Image (tube, helix red, strand yellow):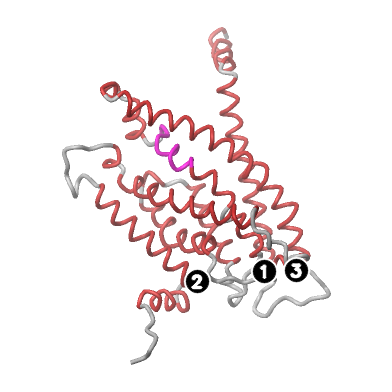
Amino acid sequence: MDAIHQNPLIDTATTLSTHYLPLTPIAVLIGVTCLVAQIFLTLLLDKRIFPRKWQGPWNDLPGFTAHQLIAFPLMCILSYYGMRDWFYNPDKEVGNETSYDRVFGETNLSDIPLAIGSGAILIWDTPTSLLVPALQDPLMLFHHVGMFLVAATMSGAFSGGKMIGYYYACYYFGVIEISSIPLTYVDVFHPKYKYYFEWLNHKKNVNRPVMMKVIQGVNELCRIVFAILFLIFRGVYFPYVTFKGTIPDLWHAYNDETKQLPDGVPMWTGYFLICFVSLFALLQCYWGMLILKQIYKMVVPGDSGKKKKKKKSN
C-alpha cells in the first residue's frame, strides 16, 4: 500500500477540472458543495415533501430560501479575504511594482475568492438562477455568467494555468462583496418575493410584536448599510479601481514591448478582461444611480405627490 492516499473527492475534482470543466480542483469542490447544499436545503424546506404544522414563506419559496442561506456565508468569506488582502496585507505591493508584475507576476491556484467566483457560480449559482423561478432575472444571469468568465480567465483556465491579474482578484472577488452581506437579508423581504413580504407585513403578526419589530428593524438597518456600502465600494470605488488601475495595467502588460507574454497566455484574454471589467464598472454605476434615486424619493417624498396632482389637474 502507498504511504500517501489521495482523497477520492480531490481525485474526482481534479479529474473534472482537468478534463471537463474550466475550473481549478478547489473551485470544483466549492461548486459541488454549494450545489449539494442547495438541493438538500430545498428538499428540507419544501412543504410538499416534508409537511409540517408550523410553516412560513421559507416553505413557499424553498429554492430561493436555500439560495440565500448559502449565499450569506459565501459573501462573508469573500469579504473577509478581500478586505484582508486588499487593505491590510503589508506585502501586497512587494513584487508588484510594474503593470506586468501586477498582471502576470503571481499565480495561486488555491485562491479561495477566485474559486468561489468561478466554481460556485458555474456549478451552483447559474443553474439555480435558471431553475428557481424566484431567481430568474436576465440581467443578473448575464452578471453571473460574466463574473464566471472573468474569474475563470483570471484563474488561468484559458492560459495553461497561468493566472492573469491576480493582484486585483481580492478586490473584484472579495472587497466588493461586502455590500452583498446585508443584501442577502434585505433581498428576502423585497416586494417581488410576495410570500416573505406579505408575511413580514401581515396583520396576524401583531401577536408577535417583539419578533416582528426585530426583523423589521434589522431589515431597515440592513437597507441603509447596504446602500452605503454599495455606493462606496461599487458605485464609486469600483470604477476608480477599474479605470485607474486594472485597465491601464492590462493594456501595458499585454503591450509591453520589452517583455513577451507568458507561455500559454493568448492575447485575446487581455482584451476580454478589459471589455468585461469595463462593462461591470458601468453596471455598478447604473445600479448606484438606481439606489441614489431610491434615496432621493425617501428624502424628498413630496415630488411624487406633486407630479400626481399635476396629472389630475390636467
Q: As rendered, which of 141 and 233 lies closer to the eye? A: 233
Question: Does the stretch in magenta take in 2?
Answer: no
Percent of width and height locating residue 73: 43, 51
**Is 196 located above or below residue 19 in the figure?**
above
**Main secondary structure of the magenta stretch:** helix
Q: Which residue is mark 1?
A: 268
**Is 15 located above or below residue 147 in the figure?**
below
Of circles 1 and 2, which is in front? 2
Numbered label tally: 3
Which portion, as a residue range, is magenta? 182-191
Q: Secondary structure at mark 3?
A: helix
Label disc, if present, on residue 72 of the rendered structure: none
In the rendered structure, which amino acid carries the disc numbered 1?
Trp
Q: Which residue is mark 3?
A: 100
In the rendered structure, which amino acid carries the disc numbered 2?
Thr
Q: Secondary structure at mark 2?
A: loop
User: Can you name the residue that lies furthest to the bottom here?
Assistant: 1
Question: Does the stretch in magenta take in 188?
Answer: yes
Q: Residues within 10 Å of mark 3 (few under 14, many from 20)?
A: many
Percent of width and height locating residue 314: 57, 9
Of circles 3 and 1, which is in front? 3
Left or right: 72 in relation to 195: right
Q: Which residue is mark 2?
A: 24
In the rendered structure, which amino acid carries the disc numbered 3?
Tyr
First of labels 3, 1 by sequence position: 3
Q: Residues within 10 Å of mark 1 (few under 14, many from 20)?
A: few
Which residue is found at the position 50% from the left and 70% from the top? 23
Q: Using the numbered discs, state the Cα–Cα distance from disc 2 to disc 3 in whole angstroms.
A: 23 Å
Q: Residues within 10 Å of mark 2 (few under 14, many from 20)?
A: many
Whether residues under marks 3 and 1 lie with C-beta atoms below 8 angstroms apart, the answer is no
**Is 212 located above or below residue 159 in the figure?**
above
The N terminus - image quarter: bottom left
